[in-house]
Image (cartoon, rainbow, N blue to C red):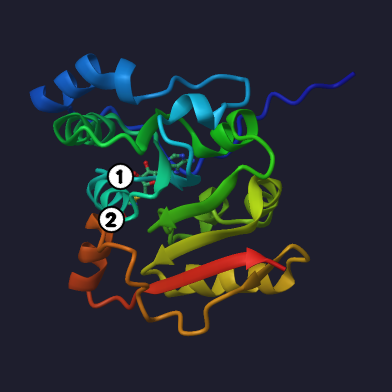
Amino acid sequence: MTTSNKRPVRSYILRQGRLTKHQERGIKNFSSKYAIPFQKSFLNFDQVFPKRNKVILEIGFGMGDSTFEIAQVMNDFNFLAVEVHSPGVGSLLNKINLSQIENLKIIQHDGIEVLNEMIPRRSLDGVHIFFPDPWPKKKHHKRRLLKKSFLELIEPKLTLSGYIHIATDWEPYAIEIIDLVKQSQFYKMSNRNFNKKPQARPFTKYEKRGLRLGHQVWDMIITLS
Ligand SMILES: C[S@@+](CC[C@H](N)C(=O)[O-])C[C@H]1O[C@@H](n2cnc3c(N)ncnc32)[C@H](O)[C@@H]1O
């Protein structure tokens, strides 16, 4: 029998980013309360969140400012927010603790593995992916999060009325995503005007950078076909 020793291509590169003292304290003091360790068994959302509500998974929340904002605005949803980098995790943990909101929990891990191992079938009402790393160089395209296999991984995790909301300021990536959806047997695009920001989505940190550079922003809402 042959086994492959090939390392998976990740959609991120783990940097040993410096943590501020405040972020460090956030991780040390509040992880046990508001973060869920990665595990190889499905979550029971009734145990994760105090209120039973629809669940939205966000992958790649960065510093988490917009995640915190949207969780407050859409407070009749529960948010499970996933990020690999510690500064954003520490920062968001501090925010959750200060505000004591109960509908936002964090997992610090690769979102693909979280989807695979922790998310039960037909349990997500939404998946938010705001400004995924565009990996603009051709040799890095293989690192892009949005690809056929990733969309296929999400499909059985969505409820039948669930959606995926993707925003990007990288036009070639947006076009690639729209093509992936068109070719998919599982999905359809549910918005038409891709350059109109849905009201519920706050401006994100990364988006503001894109806008400063003069980039146009694309929002794509994808539902099951
Ligand atoms: C360009 S940033 C955008 C952050 C934030 N959404 C915003 O708009 O400001 C993309 C983020 O996705 C995270 N990321 C990339 N791949 C990921 C994965 N597989 N699982 C979890 N986070 C991931 C990166 O660490 C990074 O923080």
User: x and y percent of residue 190 in the render?
Assistant: 58, 75
The amino acid at mark 1 is Gly
Q: Residue at x 25, y 63 (%)?
A: 203
User: Is 195 located above or below residue 205 in the figure?
Assistant: below
Mark 2 Cα-neighbour bin, 10 Å: few <14, some 14–19, many ≥20:
few
Element marked by disc 2: helix
User: Is 140 located above or below residue 101 in the figure?
Assistant: below
Q: Ligand 1 closer than 8 Å to the CB at disc 1?
A: yes
Mark 1 Cα-neighbour bin, 10 Å: few <14, some 14–19, many ≥20:
many
**Depth order, front residue of 156/129:** 156
Q: Residue at x 28, y 55 (%)?
A: 73
The amino acid at mark 2 is Val
User: x and y percent of residue 112 in the render?
Assistant: 56, 38
* Disc number lying in front (2 or 1): 2
Q: How many marks?
A: 2
Mark 2 or mark 1, earlier in chain: 1
- The answer to the question of whether label 2 and label 1 lie on touching residues, with beta carbons closer than 8 A, is no
Q: Quadrant of the C terminus?
A: bottom right
User: Is 38 located above or below residue 92 in the figure?
Assistant: above
User: x and y percent of residue 113 in the render?
Assistant: 57, 32
Label annotation for residue 62? 1
Label annotation for residue 73? 2
- State the image quarter where residue 49 is shown: top left
Name, please, the residue furthest toward the front: 51
Q: Residue at x 62, y 56 (%)?
A: 147
